[in-house]
Image: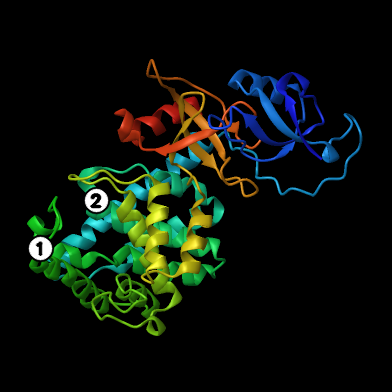
Amino acid sequence: MIVERDISQLSVGMYIVDISFPKDRFRLSSQGWVEDERIINALKAKGVERLLIDTAKSRLVGKSVTRPEKRQSPPPNSRFFSSELVKAKQVFEESKSIQQKIFHDAKNGVPLNLAPVKAVTEQSIDLIFDNPDALACVLNIRHKDQYLLEHSVAVSVLMSIFAFYLKIDKEIVHHLAIGAFLHDVGKIMIPEHILNKPGKLTDDEFAIMKTHATHSIRTIKNTPNISSLSLEVARLHHEKLNGKGYPNGLPEREISTYGRMIAICDIFDALTSTRCYKSGYPQVKAFSILRVLAKNNELDVQLVDHFIKCMGVYPVGSVVQLESNRLAIVERHNTEDPIRPTVRPFYVLNPDHFEACHHIDLATAADDLIVKCVRADDFNLNMDEIIEFLSHQG
């Protein structure tokens, strides 16, 4: 039976259904038992006065209760910021250097050298198959004046993480990663005043912008030892299921699963990236835009859902604001309770200052929750200094 109880009547073993007063100020993250006094004290500290209790589910303290087995996330890795992330940053920076050479050769009509691309994407894939969180975190360390270089590298990493999540064979993932790495090479042929225009493109300018896809396909086709799968991924990254994509306006039946995957990765990175003329969206906002595009039959609905599950409601490396008025970086997903990941607080608001903190598993923390996903830029911070701070703490 559901009954209302005053906070003073709450005791360990009761099953909380909801907060009844004040109703509009607080939201219960999930129903469940009061496991210990800490939960009661946390509710009191928040100002909760009355709750709805299911008396039929109340249990005696100390009584053995059989509960569904829960799959636990691996414990946080104390070396994550001090070693794994450093290695991931090195691979990301090396990838950018190779990408710069790729663009230079393409602009000068020199056939692309695939060997370094194969080597660095293989390094990325090995990192991802060992620990996808490290490179996912590095994707947030971006520089607004390096979008062209970083976007292609990031899409390759996202494609690899997504393919890993979908349990695609590692050898195939390597071909996908190479195709994603090269997918935008044709942009080097687009005049800079159009490529970096801060406002909306005119129809004529957009027509020129779209030619980058054709330039990319031609350049990749002429690359020695390129695989048909790598070419396919690059060729399809701007095609839409409703047939209104480019360069060929292909119908849905002619767009492969891999082509649908890279379209999602490409749009997600474009939405979340900060450029010279605009700030990127928080990841959660980008997810909502992907869903709208899927609803409009531009993207594959099922793959968009898979991508969001793959990245997590709060992606690893994203910055969140906590109820405790602190900023934290998401360190690990929680598959059982996606809105409560493991986080590492690093910054206190009002007065603003960096502060060393331990991991917090929000699934078990009774006194803190995520308020919203934010961007470091919102607080005049940048991801480089955040990661450097955390690396020193690690």
Observer-nearest residue: 343 or 281?
A: 281
- Between 105 and 308, the residue placed more toward the observer is 308
Q: CA distance from mark 1 to mark 2?
A: 21 Å
Residue at 50%, 39% in the rendered image: 330
Q: Residue at x 31, y 33 (%)?
A: 378
> Which amino acid type corresponds to the residue marked 1 in the rendered image?
Thr
Q: Is residue 145 left or right of residue 93?
A: left
> What residue does disc 1 label?
202
Q: Where on the picture, by quarter, is residue 203?
A: bottom left
Residue at 80% x, 32% y: name it: 14
**Image position of 112 with respect to 389: above or below:** below
Which residue type does callout 2 highlight? Tyr
The answer to whether residue 120 is seen in the rendering is no
Q: Residue 67 shows which numbered tag? A: none
Between 18 and 37, the one nearer to me in the picture? 18
Residue 280 % position (x, y): 30, 46
The image quadrant of residue 252 is bottom left
Residue at the disc numbered 2: 147
- Whichever of labels 1 and 2 marks the residue nearer the N terminus, that label is 2
Instruction: Describe residue 30's horizontal placement relative to residue 256 as left or right.
Output: right
Q: Residue furthest right?
A: 63
Q: Is residue 359 left or right of residue 301?
A: right
- Residue 321 percent across, percent down from the top left: 45, 32
Q: Secondary structure at mark 1?
A: loop
Residue 332 visible (yes or no): yes
Could you say whether the residue bearing mark 2 is in a helix, strand or loop? helix
